[in-house]
Image: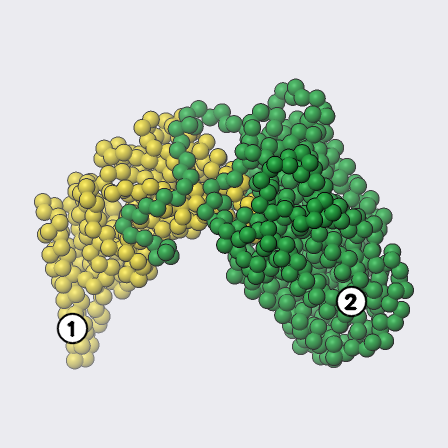
Chain colours: A yellow, B green
C-alpha cells in the first residue's frame, strides 16, 4: 500500500506533495508521485516527428520527477518515495489507470491554480476523478504547505444525517482510532434563501433552519447512543446563511482534515461527489478527504 | 398525548409568547439595517406587481364599467392602510412575520387558526388560479409563435364553460415549481429585479400601444354600474395589490424605520397604482367595457387587446412571453409561501408534524411541498377557479383586518412594548384600515362568502378536534417547542455565531 500523489511540473503547485508527504508519514507507508504525460503516437511517422514528441513527454516526466524530488527532499526525509510515470491521453485517465495499477490507500491531488490561496479549487482533472475514483481521494487547498504540527491533529467528518452516509462517520472514526487523533462530527445546516410572498414574512427560513438544526442535533446525539462514535467525540451542528458561512463557522484548527462521503451510484464502490459534497469541498479551508460510497 | 389540563376557553385564547419567540441564528447577520427608502420601494413594487393585472381586467371591468378606475383607487387605499398597520405589527412582534404568527401572539390560538384558514384559502386559490392564467398565456404564445395550440381538452378543466379533460400546462407549472422548491431553489434578488423589469416593461408596452387606439367614447356611462359595481370590482382588484405587506416585514433591515417605512409603502403604492390605473385606462380606451368579459379575452386578455389594436401578433407575443416568464416566478414565490405557512403551523403543533419535517438532504420541507403541489395541481387541473379569484382577496382582507385589530389590541395590552415603527395617526389609521378592508369585503359576491365560510369552518373544526390537543404549547415548552427526549443530546454543541476564523486565508468574497 502506498499514498499516490498526482503531480505535474508547472501544474497546481507543490501543495499536493506537502499533503502527500504528511499523509504517507501519518499512515506509515510509502509515497508514490504519479506523473501523467501525453502518450506519443504508436504508428511510426515520416521524418520521425513523433520521436520529438516522445522526447518532450519524456522530458516533462523527468522534469516533474526532478522538481518533486527537490521539494520532497526537504520535507519528506525518511520517507520511501518512488516515481511513477503514466503515458495517457488525458490526465484524469492516466491517474485512474495508476490508481487501478498501484491500488494506493489514497490518491492526492492539488487545487487548480485559478482560485484564491487557502481554498480548495476543483480543476477539470480532479472533477473527473471525484466522479470516478475507485480509491479515496484527498484534495489539498491551494498553497497548502502542511500543518505546523507536522501531521494530522484532528479528523472532522461531515455527516448530513442520512443513513447512506453513516459510512463516512464509521470510517473516519476507524481512521481516527487507528491514527490516534481526536475526531469530531459536523452536520452542516444551511439556511435557505428567502423569497417574499405576501403575509409570510422574511424570517420564515429561519424557522426551517432551526428545525433542521434541531433534527440534526438529534441525529448526531443518536451516533453516540448507538455507539457509532466514542464518548469523547465532538459533535457539532454548524449553521450558516450559505455554505461559505457555515464552513467558516466551523472552527478549524491547524492539522485538521475534513472527511466527506459520496453516495453510491450504480452499485460500484467509487467516489462520486454529489452537489452538496462539492459545495463543502469548494469552501473548505482544510484538506478534504473524499470517501467512496 | 394526555388530555391537557387547560379548559377549552383557555386553550382557544392562549397565545404564543412574544418574548423568547425563536429567532434563529441565520437571521442575525443578514438583518443589517441597510435598506433605504428607494430600495424598499423597489422591493415593494417587485413584490406587488404580480400576475393580478394580467387577468384581473377581464373579471373586474364587466362589474364596474369604466368606473373600475375608482375601484383601483379604493383597493389601493385599503392595501396601503393595512400595509402600514402590518408594519407596526412586524416591528413590535419579533416572530417570523406571517399574519398567522401575529394572530397567534396577539389574539390566541383560535384566531390564529382562523387566520390560517384565510391564508390557506388565499394561497391555495391563488396558486391554482395563477397557474391557470399561465396556461392561457402559454397557449397564446404557442399560437403566436408556431401557429399551433394545445387542444382544448388539455387546457381546460372538466367543469369549465367549455369543458376539457385537464388543464395540463397548469399542472406542469405546479410540478416544475415543486421540483425547484424541493431542490431549495429560490428567486434571488437579481432574478426578482429582472422579473420586476419584465413585468413593468410589458405593462408599459401595453399602455403605449393601447393609447394609440384610444377613444374617449368608451368612457360614456362612467358611473352606470353604481357603488355596488365599484366595490365588487375593488374586491377582485385587491388581489393584485397583495404583496405590499412584504415591505412591512422588512422592518428589521430598514434604516430609520419610522420615516422610511411609511414613505416606502406609500411610494410603492403610488407606483403600483399608477401602473395599474394606466393599464386599465389605456385598456378601457380601446374597447367597450362589456367586451372585457368576452370569452376570447377570458384567457390572455391583455394580449388579445394588443392584437386587436396592432392588427399583428408581435406585440401580443412579447406581452404573452413576458407574462409566461413572470407568472412562472410568481407561482414559485406563492407556492413557497404556502409551504412555509404550513410549516409554521406544523411546527406549532396545529398541523401534523410531518408538515414541519425538513429533509436533511435537500434542507427543505419536502413532504410539505409535495402535499401543497398535489393539492393545488388538482385544483388547477380540474376545477375552474377563475370565478373564485376573489376568494384570494377575502382571505387576505380578513387577515389584514385581524392584523389591524391586533395593532390596537397590542397597544392597549402592552403599551410599553418597544416598537421601532409606530403607526402614524393611531388610533385613526388602524380603524380606517379596518373600515377600508371592510368596504372592499362588502363588495364580494355571496358565493365567495360561502366558500370562505366553509373553509374557515373546516379548519376550525380540525382545530377543535385535533389541533388543540396537539398544540406545541401543551407540552409546556415556553418557546413553543417540544423538547426532545434523545439522551445525550446536550453533548451536541451548537455553533451559533460564525467566528471570524480563517485557517489559511480569507475567502475572496469577504471584505
Residue A265 appears left or right of B317: left
Q: Residue at x 37, y 55 (%)?
A: B510
Residue B453 percent coordinates (x, y): 79, 41
Residue B245 percent coordinates (x, y): 64, 51
Q: Residue at x 29, y 52 (%)?
A: B505
The residue singled out by tag 2 in the image is B297
The residue singled out by tag 1 in the image is A51
Q: Residue at x 66, y 71 (%)?
A: B204
- Is B213 placed above or below A192 here? below
Residue B38 appears left or right of A94: right
For label 1, the SS is helix
Q: Quadrant of residue B90?
A: top right
- Is A87 placed above or below A159 here? below
Does any portion of residue A55 appear in the rendered image? yes
Image mark 2: chain: B
- Is B158 placed above or below A249 here? below
Tell which of B60 and B87 is nearer to you: B87
Tell which of B464 and B429 is nearer to you: B429
Residue B110 appears left or right of B64: left
Image mark 1: chain: A
Placement of the N terminus of chain B among the 4 image quadrants: top right
Count residues near mark 2 (Cα–Cα under 10 Å), then give few for <14, some for 14-19, many for 20+: some
Camera-near label (1 vs 2) is 2
For label 2, the SS is helix
Tell which of B282 and B38 is nearer to you: B38
Residue A122 percent coordinates (x, y): 33, 56
Placement of the C terminus of chain B among the 4 image quadrants: bottom left
Q: Quadrant of residue B232?
A: bottom right
Residue B188 percent coordinates (x, y): 52, 57
Amino acid at each position: 500500500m502506498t499514498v499516490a500523489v498526482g503531480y505535474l511540473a508547472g501544474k497546481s503547485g507543490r501543495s499536493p506533495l506537502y499533503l502527500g508527504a504528511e499523509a504517507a508519514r501519518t499512515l506509515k507507508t510509502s509515497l508514490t508521485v504519479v506523473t501523467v504525460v501525453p502518450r506519443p503516437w504508436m504508428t511510426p511517422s515520416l521524418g520521425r516527428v513523433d520521436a520529438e514528441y516522445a522526447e518532450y513527454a519524456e522530458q516533462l516526466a523527468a522534469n516533474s520527477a526532478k522538481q518533486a524530488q527537490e521539494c520532497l527532499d526537504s520535507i519528506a526525509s525518511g520517507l520511501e518515495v518512488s516515481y511513477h510515470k503514466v503515458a495517457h491521453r488525458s490526465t484524469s485517465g492516466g491517474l485512474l489507470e495508476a490508481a487501478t495499477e498501484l491500488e494506493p490507500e489514497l490518491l492526492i491531488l492539488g487545487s487548480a491554480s485559478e482560485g484564491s490561496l487557502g481554498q480548495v479549487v476543483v480543476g477539470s482533472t480532479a472533477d473527473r476523478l471525484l466522479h470516478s475514483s475507485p480509491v479515496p481521494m484527498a484534495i489539498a487547498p491551494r498553497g497548502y504547505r502542511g500543518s505546523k504540527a507536522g501531521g494530522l491533529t484532528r479528523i472532522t467528518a461531515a455527516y448530513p444525517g442520512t443513513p447512506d452516509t453513516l459510512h463516512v462517520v464509521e470510517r473516519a472514526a476507524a481512521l481516527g482510532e487507528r491514527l490516534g487523533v481526536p475526531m469530531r462530527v459536523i452536520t452542516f445546516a444551511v439556511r435557505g434563501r428567502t423569497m417574499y410572498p405576501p403575509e409570510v414574512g422574511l424570517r420564515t427560513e429561519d424557522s426551517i433552519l432551526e428545525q433542521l438544526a434541531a433534527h440534526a442535533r438529534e441525529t448526531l446525539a443518536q451516533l453516540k447512543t448507538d455507539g457509532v462514535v466514542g464518548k469523547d467525540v465532538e459533535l457539532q451542528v454548524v449553521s450558516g446563511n450559505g455554505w461559505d458561512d457555515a464552513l467558516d463557522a466551523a472552527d478549524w484548527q491547524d492539522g485538521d482534515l475534513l472527511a466527506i462521503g459520496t453516495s453510491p451510484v450504480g452499485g460500484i464502490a467509487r467516489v462520486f461527489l454529489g452537489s452538496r459534497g462539492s459545495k463543502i469541498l469548494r469552501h473548505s479551508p482544510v484538506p478534504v478527504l473524499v470517501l467512496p460510497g | 398525548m394526555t388530555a391537557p389540563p387547560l379548559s377549552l376557553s383557555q386553550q382557544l385564547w392562549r397565545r404564543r409568547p412574544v418574548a423568547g419567540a425563536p429567532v434563529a441564528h441565520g437571521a442575525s447577520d443578514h438583518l443589517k439595517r441597510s435598506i433605504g427608502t428607494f430600495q424598499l420601494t423597489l422591493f415593494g413594487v417587485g413584490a406587488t406587481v404580480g400576475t393580478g393585472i394580467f387577468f384581473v381586467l377581464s373579471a373586474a371591468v364587466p362589474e364596474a364599467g369604466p368606473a373600475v378606475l375608482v375601484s383601483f383607487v379604493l383597493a389601493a387605499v385599503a392595501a396601503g392602510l393595512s400595509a402600514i398597520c402590518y408594519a407596526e405589527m412586524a416591528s413590535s412582534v419579533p416572530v417570523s412575520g406571517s399574519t398567522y404568527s401575529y394572530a397567534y401572539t396577539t389574539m390566541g390560538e383560535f384566531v390564529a387558526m382562523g387566520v390560517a384558514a384565510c391564508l390557506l384559502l388565499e394561497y391555495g386559490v391563488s396558486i391554482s388560479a395563477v397557474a391557470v392564467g399561465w396556461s392561457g398565456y402559454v397557449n397564446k404564445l404557442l399560437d403566436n409563435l408556431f401557429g399551433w395550440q394545445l387542444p382544448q381538452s388539455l387546457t381546460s378543466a372538466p367543469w369549465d364553460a367549455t369543458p376539457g379533460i385537464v388543464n395540463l400546462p397548469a399542472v406542469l407549472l405546479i410540478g416544475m415549481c415543486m421540483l425547484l422548491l424541493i431542490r431549495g431553489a429560490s428567486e434571488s434578488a437579481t432574478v426578482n429585479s429582472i422579473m420586476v423589469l419584465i413585468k413593468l416593461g410589458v405593462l408599459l408596452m401595453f399602455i403605449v400601444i393601447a393609447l394609440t387606439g384610444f377613444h374617449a367614447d368608451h368612457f360614456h356611462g362612467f358611473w352606470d354600474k353604481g357603488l355596488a359595481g365599484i366595490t365588487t370590482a375593488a374586491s377582485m382588484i385587491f388581489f393584485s395589490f397583495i404583496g405590499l405587506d412584504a415591505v412591512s416585514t422588512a422592518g428589521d433591515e430598514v434604516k430609520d424605520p419610522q420615516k422610511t417605512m411609511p414613505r416606502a409603502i406609500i411610494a410603492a403604492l403610488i407606483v403600483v397604482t399608477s401602473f395599474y390605473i394606466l393599464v386599465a385606462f389605456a385598456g378601457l380606451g380601446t374597447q367597450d367595457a362589456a367586451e372585457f368579459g368576452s370569452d376570447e379575452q377570458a384567457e390572455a386578455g391583455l394580449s388579445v387587446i394588443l392584437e386587436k389594436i396592432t392588427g399583428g401578433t408581435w406585440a401580443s407575443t412579447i406581452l404573452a412571453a413576458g407574462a409566461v416568464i413572470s407568472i412562472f416566478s410568481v407561482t414559485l414565490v406563492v407556492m413557497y409561501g404556502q409551504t412555509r405557512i404550513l410549516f409554521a403551523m406544523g411546527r406549532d403543533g396545529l398541523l401534523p408534524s410531518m408538515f414541519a419535517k425538513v429533509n436533511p438532504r435537500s434542507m427543505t420541507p419536502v413532504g410539505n411541498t409535495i402535499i401543497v403541489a398535489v393539492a393545488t395541481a388538482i385544483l388547477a387541473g380540474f376545477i375552474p377557479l377563475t370565478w373564485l379569484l376573489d376568494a384570494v382577496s377575502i382571505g387576505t382582507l380578513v387577515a389584514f383586518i385581524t392584523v389591524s385589530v391586533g395593532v390596537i389590541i397590542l397597544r392597549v395590552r402592552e403599551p410599553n412594548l418597544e416598537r421601532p415603527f409606530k403607526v402614524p395617526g393611531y388610533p385613526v389609521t388602524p380603524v380606517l384600515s379596518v373600515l377600508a378592508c371592510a368596504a372592499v369585503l362588502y363588495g364580494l359576491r355571496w358565493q365567495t362568502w360561502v366558500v370562505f365560510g366553509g373553509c374557515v369552518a373546516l379548519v376550525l373544526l380540525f382545530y377543535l378536534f385535533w389541533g388543540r390537543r396537539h398544540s406545541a404549547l401543551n407540552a409546556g415548552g415556553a418557546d413553543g417547542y417540544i423538547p426532545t427526549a434523545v439522551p445525550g443530546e446536550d453533548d451536541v454543541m451548537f455553533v451559533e455565531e460564525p467566528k471570524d476564523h480563517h485557517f489559511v486565508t480569507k475567502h475572496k468574497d469577504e471584505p
